[in-house]
Image (tube, helix red, strand yellow):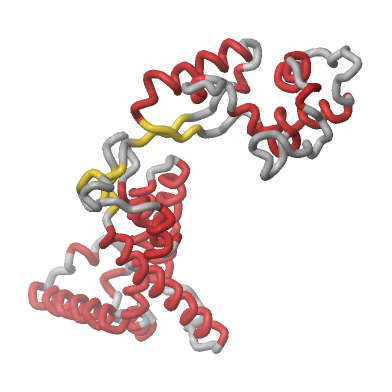
Amino acid sequence: MIESLSDSTIYMAYYTIAHKLQGEGNLDGSGVSPCGITPSQLNDDVFNFIFLRGPQPSDAGAPPLAVLEELRAEFEYWYPMDLRVSGKDLIGNHLTMALYNHAAVWKDRPELWPRGYYTNGHLNLNGEKMSKSTGNFLMLEEAVEKFSADATRYALGFAGDTLENANFVTDEANAAVNMLFLEEKFAAEVVAEQKAGRLRKGEMLRMDERLTLEIDRLVLETTANFDAMMQALFLLFCRCLDLFQLFHLFGLLFAFCLISTFVCLHSLSGLLDETPLFLKSSPSSSSFFTSKKNEENCVGLCA
């Protein structure tokens, strides 16, 4: 008999030994066990030894001690589950009962209780409920074939990561295909430029330092959201990182506009005989354009 509410039990513990006890491609158990154990040798004493640190089975037909210790080692290494992913509709039944069962079976070993649950809502497609009858339906394999695995992951990440229903948008997936292509192309071009020795070298400019700090901040934010499984925010910060490509692609235009702004404000300050407020933030900033080096630094902001 198969328990229909198996999520409410501790069957996840079997995952840790299934590859050795049952083996790959042996779903019904009719094949040979990789560790040489037969179904007739399995009883409560065997599983108590593996999962509960029970005594060695004493019956004559018990599996060899070395094999049992190997299975126990697998369980002790892999358990508990770090994360159980499920639907929000199972919070009040399956997932809660699973906690109760783990607490009852391993009452003296709370370190074996589930470490975390991640639940989500249902998935809509382009803002509408998926339904085969209406044709608004997309299988995972079909999405991978149509958009690629990476673009599908990207669109799923933006679909939503809360208990609200997520929304997979095909336009987002299509945009991701183009974005990922340009991302790879941009990286390849930069690597090629570096190998050819055409990238600027030497002392870090002020904008270089600020840009580096901003990238570091975005990396920290991205990592924190990724660890918290907040995929939408994680991808949002990734998009911010992509904006730094604009510095590379439109660097000369940006530098020209920035210099023009500084020159105009500096000229205006001369007419008013007053230093602009934004130049008062640093003791040396009022003489920003007094040296050739600073002017060259400003021109080389995005080089």
Residue at 84%, 30% (x, y): give it. 67
Q: How many marks?
A: 0
Q: Quadrant of the C terminus?
A: bottom left
User: In this view of the protein, which residue sits in the foreground, 297 or 218?
Assistant: 218
| Image coords of residue 208 (percent x, y) | 42, 71
Q: Answer with the quarter of the image where residue 274 lies.
A: bottom left
Q: Quadrant of residue 146?
A: bottom left
Residue at the spot x=89%, y=26% of the render? 64
Regarding residue 214, the answer to whether it shows in the image is no
Across and down, in percent, residue 128 comes to: 20, 47
| Residue lying at 31% horizontally and 63% vertically, measured from the top left | 282
Horizontal placement of 217 versus 14: left or right?
left
> Please, is residue 82 above or below residue 11 in the view?
below
Camera-side residue of 94 and 100 = 94
Position of residue 225 relative to residue 172, above or below, is above
Most extreme residue toward the left is 272
Q: Position of residue 244 (x, y in %)?
A: 36, 69
Query: Quick one: 221 or 140, which is closer to the camera?
Result: 140
Is any atom of residue 104 visible in this view? yes
The quarter of the displayed image where residue 184 is located:
bottom left
* Direction front: furthest residue: 30
| Residue at point 38%, 74% (across, down) | 182
Residue pushed farthest right? 60
Task: Please identify the quadrant where the N terminus is shown.
Answer: top right
- Percent position (x, y) of residue 258? 24, 76
